[in-house]
Amino acid sequence: MIFLKVVYRILRWVAAIFFGSTILAVVAYRFIPVHITPLMLIRVAEQVSDGKNIKMHHSWVSLGEMSKYMPVAVIASEDQRFLQHHGFDFEAISKAVEHNKKSKKKFGASTISQQTAKNVFLWPGRTWVRKGLETYFTFLIEMAWSKERIIEVYLNSIEMGDGIYGVDAVAEDHFKTTAACLKRDQCALIAATLPNPIIYNSANPSQYVLKRQRRIMREMIHIPLLEERNNNK
């Protein structure tokens, strides 16, 4: 009986520490830049283990310092219902489940909110534990952050090339410019590589990436600029 009470007390403290620390982290990141993520550290460790020079190019820029087309491009490419859903696109999930039943090529249905939660707080992987934590953090950021903040953090933390993280870094490395000066077609080209930015390169795009770029540019017509959305609130 005493043993069970001790275990219960320990579990209660563990739960309190976990929920307290994670909620505090989410609230803090509502206001402060995200300069380092678990994936960045994992990639550095991989580079060291492979005997390569460490490359981690990342610089934080606010949403106002990015091209107005960059959020539109990634929404058109990755999550067209981003501005409507609350973290989970159940329509996309249902379609992905039906497709995956019939095809060997599997489709995912992760939203920008889910990808942001994974990029900032978790590690890559497909285990049930990680997916559960991803759901938890997605719920928290949707509750605590605005859509503008979610897309801002996403565009600053996502991997966009080998050792390249965020839109300002990829703008400098691949286009010799800044995030603010990216053109509409360049934004679409960057977004076209996001399924796998290690394989697909916006500086040297394949025909497949260029095809995706053209599709994304067509879809961008239907996505409102965030500044227009704010003016209509």
Image (cartoon, rainbow, N blue to C red):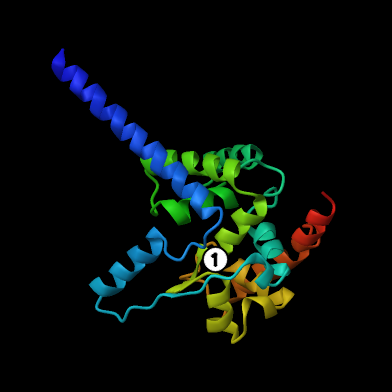
> Is residue 37 or residue 203 the one in the foreground?
37
Residue 128 against residue 154 in the figure, above or below: above
Residue sticking out furthest to the top? 1
Pointer 1 residue = 156
* Residue 143 at x, y percent in the picture: 59, 40
* Residue 141 at x, y percent in the picture: 55, 45
* Residue 134 at x, y percent in the picture: 46, 44
Q: Is residue 221 left or right of residue 36?
A: right
Which residue shows up at 61% across the image and 71% down it?
190
Q: Is residue 225 visible?
A: no
Q: Quadrant of residue 42?
A: bottom left
Q: The N terminus appears in which quarter of the rendering?
A: top left
Q: Quadrant of residue 163?
A: bottom left
Residue 44 against residue 14 in the figure, above or below: below
Which residue shows up at 72% across the image and 68% down it?
69
Residue sticking out furthest to the right? 232
Which residue shows up at 56% across the image and 56% down it?
31
* Residue 71 at x, y percent in the picture: 67, 63
Q: Is residue 160 visible?
A: yes
Q: Amino acid at mark 1?
A: Asn
Secondary structure at numbered mark 1:
helix
Q: Residues within 10 Å of mark 1 (few under 14, many from 20)?
A: many
Which residue shows up at 24% across the image and 78% down it?
51
Q: Is residue 4 left or right of residue 148?
A: left
Number of callouts: 1
